[in-house]
Amino acid sequence: MLISTIFAAVLLVACSEENTIEENNPIKTETEEIKELVQDYSVRNITAKSVSITSKQLFVTDNDGTEQVYNLPKDEFFVSIAPYINETHPCDNHSLTGCQGEMVSEQFNVYIEDAEGNVLVDDTLITEANGFIDLWLPREQSFQIKIEHQGKTVESEFSTFENDGTCITTMQLV
């Protein structure tokens, strides 16, 4: 009886230590954390006074006025695209708290290939509550994009070089 009680106690301690180690030490890369942070602001899981993103950095001003700057991944570029039919706005660098696209929670067929013809995206994507499709693509490249929605299409080019904007609001579906 004593041996079985000790065995049970050891087993419970071993299991709880294993769970504690996994829960307290999640292995995430800095890139994953930045992408999750951008996603949380974009889908409005978290809010701030203002959040904007350039080709290199994410700028967050919290509701209390505290400012934070996060460096983006060195090999990936964030771009946010708002396809539209009737209404758009001029934009260069995306504001995750200010930009609003016309087509909210709409489904689009999105096809993107690089200059060598490699397909990076060929999927059905849904715009977020802000009317944008967020993508992380390789840096320092040019792309062809085709977006389709309910019989309307737009084809365009864009790139992910250092001085390129992160907000594309010029893709009108016709």
Image (cartoon, helix red, strand yellow):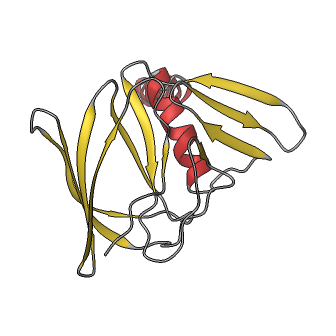
Residue at image position (85%, 31%) is 66
Residue 92 falls in which quadrant of the image?
Answer: top right
- For this rendering, which residue is in front, 174 or 4? 174
- For this rendering, which residue is in front, 125 or 23? 125
Question: Quick check: can you spot residue 18?
Answer: no
Compared with residue 64, is residue 140 higher up or lower down, i.e. above or below? Answer: above
Horizontal side of 74 relative to 129 (left or right) equals left
Quarter of the figure with the C terminus:
bottom left
Horizontal side of 155 relative to 85 (left or right) equals left
Residue at image position (48%, 26%) is 163
Residue 170 falls in which quadrant of the image?
Answer: bottom left
* Residue 173 screen position, x and y as percent: 34, 71
Quarter of the figure with the N terminus:
top left
Compared with residue 18, is residue 43 higher up or lower down, i.e. above or below? Answer: below
Residue 126 falls in which quadrant of the image?
Answer: bottom left
* Residue 7 screen position, x and y as percent: 41, 25
Residue at image position (48%, 77%) is 86
Residue at the bottom extreme, as displayed: 150
Residue at image position (51%, 39%) is 36
Horizontal side of 130 relative to 158 (left or right) equals right
Question: Quick check: can you spot residue 110?
Answer: yes
- For this rendering, which residue is in front, 92 or 82? 92
* Residue 69 screen position, x and y as percent: 68, 24
Residue at the left extreme, as displayed: 117
Count numbered badges in the picture. 0
